[in-house]
Image: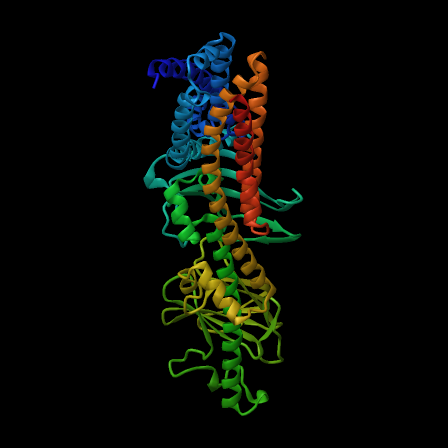
Amino acid sequence: MPWTLYRYILWDVFRLLLLSSVALLTVISFAAAVKPLSEGLLGPAAVLKFVAFTTPTMIQYTLPFATAFAVTLTFSRLVSDNEVTAMVAGGMSYTKILMPIGMLGGCLMVLLFVMSNWIVPTFNQQALGMIQKDVIKLTVTQLQKGETVTLGEWVLYADNAKSIDDPAELPTLPGSDLQPDQAVSLQGASVAQIDPDTQEIIGHGTAEKAHLLVFRQDGRVWVQFNLENAEIKRENVQGSFDEVEQVPSIPIDRPFVDKPRAMSWAQLRELARYPDRYDRVHEAKRSLVERLAEEELLRSLEQGLVDVAGRRVEAAGSVNQVSVNGPNDGNRAGEPVGLVLHGAVEGERYVITAPVAQREGSTLKLPAVPNMPIRIDHFEGDKRLRRYEARDGAVIKAEFTAVDAEPRAVFELNNVLVLDGSLRPPGTERQKLRLTRLYWRQSLVGSRMQMTSQRLLAELDARGEPLPAIKTGMHRLRVNVDVLLSQIVGEFHLRASLAFGCLLATLLGAVLSIHLRGNIPLVTFFWTFLCVLGSLVLAYAGKRLVSDPDAAWAVGLIILWGGNVVLAGGMGWIFAKLR
């Protein structure tokens, strides 16, 4: 083989390829930094470092065009200088003339496939780390300037903000063992909750003091902020909270990590085997398990209260014989007989008795019965702290908060008499009272969270769960699993298609340059550019169809690979005309 000629051609192509690749990568990498810079996620000094990390991630988009450009210019010059004609006259076939370009395209195809599957995700992680690292610094700067900060659905403002740098002074979340990675102390804080669809304010509040906490665990980053001595208003209902009001955790957007298109080959294969590890699937699964736990808590409360009321009636002989303070209301230790719920503190418990329990939708209602108040005795160890007697009924709801691993029962009591541990009158009268930290005796979440999503869905399908909220949660989980698996399949094929397209772009530039001899190089590159761009657009359009669980995979794959097939067929037809 004429290796001297091949080295001559390849050196010319390589020189132009290097220059064009650097130019394209620089422009596109700086363009990628515009969005995080404009959103305040990057400081001006960090832009160059961010660009350095994102540059390798852009190679899969720029390499086919840069290669086509370099090959087009090289072969256009060879054609215009009649060097190709000399090669043919010397007995070389077009196949041998294009051999070095084919070898170059094959090497670039392998390089692109390896980079997109194993190298690019690493640089994505580095770029992401820069964005997440600057979250607190930029938040403090914005708040100190008197600007608002938007975190998820919440808008935050403070009169003064100060970063807590000493690890020993970092605050923690009540009821949580997690330690924050960073924290900001806020004075004179205000928050507003925005509806994500209508952008209307649906809740707002103020607090004397607040803490903004950043947590990092298992590669995930989220924000939590607490409002102390807060006064919150939601849906036209004003309420003051003596305890810290905890705003739900807000995940920091991870535009690279949270999408399969930026995961490595090994991560995608692992994710296909264990889809529950994907954030969106995990969140959908947790949401479903929480709805199941809330429903199970309300059912257990209803059954428990009915059983207790039935035992009291059976012991008394009839409903009318049940005494408010009779002997059937206590055991031998003097503790009332009722449904027992645990409190948030170890050894804390609540004993509940109610004459009637009625389920209505997502609540459990305890209607008022003459001379039979709803009674809640609050104990810590063996000591009774206080008793609540609701004379006008009560409502029980099940709900989760940001730090709850289990659902809590929330009691809303009407016309309440609060007695101390001695039960001596007169006590304190309250028109309304809300008890929020009551928990069921056994875990209602743990066992289901250990199941795989597929097994959980199969169990619920077999059970035929009728509740709309649970059906909605099942549908959401099933859709997220299907979408994830579809995205993984689409990502595998897209990367292979883009790599193969780079080989085709390399050969196409050379073939068109010979076929369109007599035209200026710009015309040849224009047609090469259009062909490569069309193939790229079809590849991404097909990938979107493959990633859509409602669309047929076969149709998406045909479109995904269709651009390359048409490109290869057209190039083969042109090459056949050269011979």
Left or right: where does residue 241 sit relative to residue 496?
right
Quadrant location of the N terminus in the rendered image: top left
Q: Is residue 446 at least partly visible in the picture? A: yes
Q: Is residue 149 at least partly visible in the picture? A: no
Q: Quadrant of residue 124?
A: top left
Q: How many marks?
A: 0
State the residue in front, 24 or 531. Answer: 531
Q: How is the image coloured?
A: rainbow
State the residue in front, 426 or 460. Answer: 460
**x and y, in percent, of residue 484 in the image:** 49, 49
**x and y, in percent, of residue 226 in the image:** 48, 46
State the residue in front, 420 or 576. Answer: 576
- Residue 340 vs 84, above or below: the answer is below
Query: Residue visible at 52% across and 9% down?
Result: 80
- Residue 150 vs 330, above or below: the answer is above
Query: Residue visible at 49% across and 10% down?
Result: 77
Left or right: where does residue 540 sit relative to residue 123?
right
**x and y, in percent, of residue 532 in the image:** 54, 28
**x and y, in percent, of residue 357 in the image:** 57, 76
